[in-house]
Amino acid sequence: MATEPAIDIRGLRKSYGSLEAVRGIDLRVERGEVFSLLGPNGAGKTTTVEILEGHRSRSAGEVSVLGHDPGRNDPALKRQVGIVLQQTGVDLYLTVREVVEMIAGYYPAPRDVDEVIGLAGLTEQRDQRVKKLSGGQRRRVDLAVALAGDPELLFLDEPTTGFDPSARRQAWETVRGLTALGKTIFLTTHFMDEAQALADRLAIIADGVIVAAGTASELIGASSTTSRIRFRLPDGSRPPDDSGARADGAWWEIETDAPTRAVHDLTGWALESGTTLIDLEITRRSLEDVYLQLTADAEATE
């Protein structure tokens, strides 16, 4: 069915003895979208992804990946899925083209090898041995390997770890290019800016449960405070008590969902009192702020 999601999870649970790592989560990933699962180490993120990939069994719940149960080890599903792991073991003494050509040979309908190399941004390195490549270029080989079978669904696990800023942005463009081809991408990353830049929707997992899900804008907008005002004051000065400002080292900080009113009141007070607001800055609450708050709240309730 055209409306069938790429991934559908209902009541997923996974226990290791008395430890319940995943405690009844529900997720739906639509076909053709980039979905990012975020969470701290030990939150159940890796366990969830490994269940989706078919590498780990579940204790309870229903899981559908491209219409298949990944726990059944179905070859038909494996032919439609590509995986970029944090670490891979490609032969370092083969050239880029030889590696991709070898992997493509395992699939009944692989994508053209040279096209895959181009999608991964490795055309100029196609005849170089993998051992001669930089760390960032080797991660591109991992991506090329995952694309060789022309998968419908791609799992990207920390795909830009170790990249410099320029290489990260190039990798982002590669991911955007894959979505233009109709691929569904399930992304895990510790970089909040990466998730915010790439994901159509995302979910945050903490202590084995989903604590928030939606677009980045929805998660930020759902926060009780959406903006932060920071400033310093001359020695001996302090803001009015009703401003809501709290000290943060040498800075004062106000978190508010009504920044226009807060700045108006603050600057009005400064003008009336003859006080200088030093290095006044206003920033919108970020996805990272929301992530840190939600995961901290989850830990506090354990």
Image: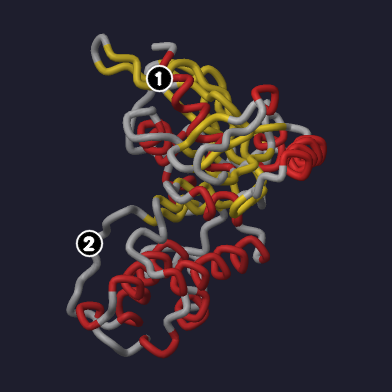
Residue 169, percent across and down? Answer: 52, 69
Which residue is at 41% across, 41% downward? 53
Secondary structure category for the residue under label 1:
helix
The foreground one among 124 and 197 is 197
Q: State which quadrant residue 175 falls in.
A: bottom right
Picture coordinates of residue 64, whole percent (x, y): 55, 32
Q: Please name the colour scheme applied to the rendered image.
A: secondary structure
Of the pair 210 and 225, the residue shown nearer to us: 225
* Quadrant in which residue 106 is drawn: bottom left
Q: Which residue is mark 1?
A: 299
> Mark 1 is on which residue type?
Glu
In the displayed structure image, the side of residue 252 where residue 155 appears, left or right = left
205 vs 66: above or below:
above
Q: What is the quadrant of the C terminus in the image?
A: top left
Instruction: Identify the image quadrant of the N terminus.
Output: top right
Residue 56 shown left or right of residue 183 in the figure = left
Q: Residue placed at 63% from the left, 40% from the top?
A: 228
How far, Cα to Cα, is label 2 from label 1? 35 Å
| Residue 89 image label | 2
Local packing at callout 1 (Cα closer than 10 Å; few below 14, some 14-19, many 20+) is few
- Identify which amino acid the numbered label 2 is placed on: Gly
Q: Secondary structure at mark 2?
A: loop
The percent position of residue 143, horizontal first and vertical second, equals: 42, 65
